[in-house]
Amino acid sequence: MVLAHGAIIVLCSDGVTGAQNEQRKQFGKQTIERIIKQCSQQSAGQIIQILQSELHIFTAQEYM
């Protein structure tokens, strides 16, 4: 496989995609894809921070 210049590869555990909110909705791959598309011009470190923040917000009610 040849990657295009600027391609983004995301590796995560099923714990990220399977994380659930209060309504038992999963974070899912689609959410990760949406965030990556919105933040694709950011650095890798910034994308990670945004993903972590979005995951925390998504699951926050689950841990309160």
Image: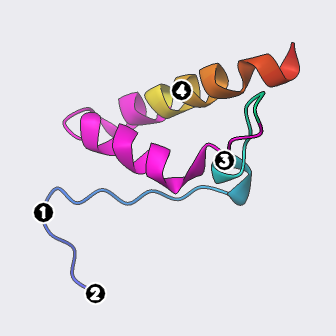
Q: Of the residues shown, which amino acid type is indicated by label 2?
A: Met
Identify the image quadrant of the C terminus.
Answer: top right
Q: Mark 3 or mark 2, which has the lower sequence index?
A: 2
Residue furthest toward the bottom? 1
Label 4's element? helix
The disc label shown at residue 5, or none:
1
From the image, tell me which residue sits under label 2. Answer: 1
Distance from disc 4 to disc 1, alpha carbons, whole Å, reads: 27 Å
Distance from disc 3 to disc 4, alpha carbons, whole Å, reads: 11 Å
Name the residue at 67% across, 45% down: 26
Observer-nearest of 62 and 56: 62
From the image, tell me which residue sits under label 4. Answer: 54
Q: Mark 2 or mark 4, which has the lower sequence index?
A: 2
Q: Dot 1, how many residues are within 10 Å of its Cα: few (below 14), some (14-19), or many (20+)?
A: few
Observer-nearest of 28 and 3: 28
Distance from disc 1 to disc 2, alpha carbons, whole Å, reads: 13 Å
Distance from disc 1 to disc 3, alpha carbons, whole Å, reads: 27 Å
Q: Mark 4 or mark 1, which has the lower sequence index?
A: 1
Residue 32 is situated, as x and y percent measured from the top left of the image, at: 46, 46
Q: Which residues are magenta?
A: 24-48
Q: Of the residues shown, which amino acid type is indicated by label 4?
A: Glu
Examine the structure image and report whether residue 38 is included in the region drawn in magenta.
Answer: yes
Q: Quadrant of residue 21?
A: top right
Q: Dot 3, how many residues are within 10 Å of its Cα: few (below 14), some (14-19), or many (20+)?
A: some
Q: Of the residues shown, which amino acid type is indicated by label 1?
A: His
Q: Of the residues shown, which amino acid type is indicated by label 3?
A: Val
Residue 51 is situated, as x and y percent measured from the top left of the image, at: 50, 33
The disc label shown at residue 16, or none:
3
Q: Dot 4, how many residues are within 10 Å of its Cα: few (below 14), some (14-19), or many (20+)?
A: some
